[in-house]
Amino acid sequence: MNYSIMEQQLNGEYRDAFTAVITYGTLKNYSDEIMTERIAELFDTLLTAQTNGKPVGKIIGHNTERFCREFFEDCSNWDMTVKFLQSLFYMSCITFVLVLLLYLTDRGSAEGARYNLTPCIIGAAIYFIFSAVSNLIIVPLMFKSQKIKPAVWHRISLIVFFVIFITALILGSQTRSWIYIPESAYLICSGAYIAVYFIIRSVIRYRKNGSILKAPEDTIYIQNNREFNDKKYDAIVMKTWKKRYDVQYAKGKTDPGKFIEKLKKNNSTSRKMNILTGIAVISVYGVSVFRFASDGNITATIIFSLICGVICYKIWKFFIGALSSAQTQNDRLISECESSGLPFPEFAEKILKIYFSFTISRYAGSKRSLRICKAIKLN
């Protein structure tokens, strides 16, 4: 869930309260599922209060720490354990692929090849140390130091993490007590953990959602509010374009017609860059597979090509897919502007007004969630 977009719609003490709860939940390391559901409800309530001019104290009370504790009171240590197991699953997948690639090469397939387990132990130590520092030091200080905003404490936590991370790396580089295990043993152990985790997760998802596939992300905030998110995107883009237009128009460098043509040209150039990037990714993939295949090991080449193919696909989907989606939306806005017959400044103002009116109507009759009512002891 994109919390930054939510924060932009809240002002003053409403934003501070919202950020405080996000920071608390993040430092407590609650799972993404819990944070997504709770934060969506809290945002709904705070935006309604802001729209109606209701003081934030009526929502969270005068003790933010108590509100945060009660807001997440039904989240047990088991939830944090699940988050750790999930992180361990992702780390196991990454290291499994890397070790498998080494194992398939001449260097890794040699008899007696071993994998250095020390980095994994250091990584786990970093996780536990940072969690302890966050829970025992940063969270209590955040609520005691009222003059420092929650957003600042979030940045402080990032600095603390990097300090712990760098310190662990330095200490790890100085140690001579490396822990090695055979690569085949690591592949068996990590592969077994990945398989068991995947099976258990699939069973839980099937019982909960009727499918082993992950439920669409941000179901409450995105799926049920698709129209709102589309209008929000239009407003963000138009606000950016309008600001750029005003600067260029003030300098006498553009007019409504020229600006639209420039937007179309920029979007077209971006699409061409996407094609070139795709060709580059495919080329790198092809060269890598060809060089690996030159060794003559067909089985290793097939496995290597599948692994690299998945990696390239993820890169393509994450970067190129997101850009292509944004470019399609931008093309739609440009087309709507041209078909409306309005000059660009007037069309931009129209889009912003539509988004503002839609937001007000959407939250005017919003109902406070039962969980928030329980947290602030309202009947």
Image (cartoon, rainbow, N blue to C red):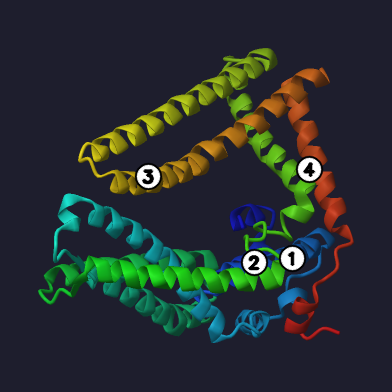
* Dot 1 and dot 2 residues touching (CB under 8 Å): yes
* C-alpha separation, residue under disc 4 versus residue under disc 1: 18 Å
Q: Which amino acid does label 2 sit on?
A: Phe
**Callout 2–callout 4 Cβ contact below 8 Å:** no
Give the quadrant of the C terminus: bottom right
Q: Earlier in the sequence, mark 2 or mark 4?
A: 2
Query: First in sequence: mark 1 or mark 3?
Result: 1
Name the residue beneath numbered marker 2: 18
Residue toward you, 270 or 151: 270
Q: Residues under labels 1 and 3: Cα distance?
A: 45 Å
At which x and y percent is residue 288?
A: 29, 37
Give how far across and how far down residue 164 sits, in percent.
30, 71
Count residues near mark 4 (Cα–Cα under 10 Å), then give few for <14, some for 14-19, many for 20+: many
Q: Distance between the residues labelled 2 and 3?
A: 41 Å
Which amino acid is tagged 4?
Tyr
Earlier residue among tags 2 and 3: 2
- As helix, strand or loop, the secondary structure at mark 3 comes to helix
**Who's the residue at 34% across and 62% down the image?**
96
User: Which label sits on residue 308?
Assistant: 3
Q: Nearer the viewer, mark 3 or mark 4?
A: 3
Question: Which residue matches tag 4?
Answer: 355
Q: Which amino acid does label 1 sit on?
A: Leu
Q: Which of marks 4 and 1 is nearer the N terminus?
A: 1
* x then y, percent, for residue 316: 48, 39
Neighbor class of circle 3 (other Cα within 10 Å; few <14, some 14-19, many 20+) is: some
- Residue 66: quadrant of the picture: bottom right
Tell me, for residue 46, which label it has, or none.
1
Q: Nearer the viewer, residue 143 or 328?
A: 328
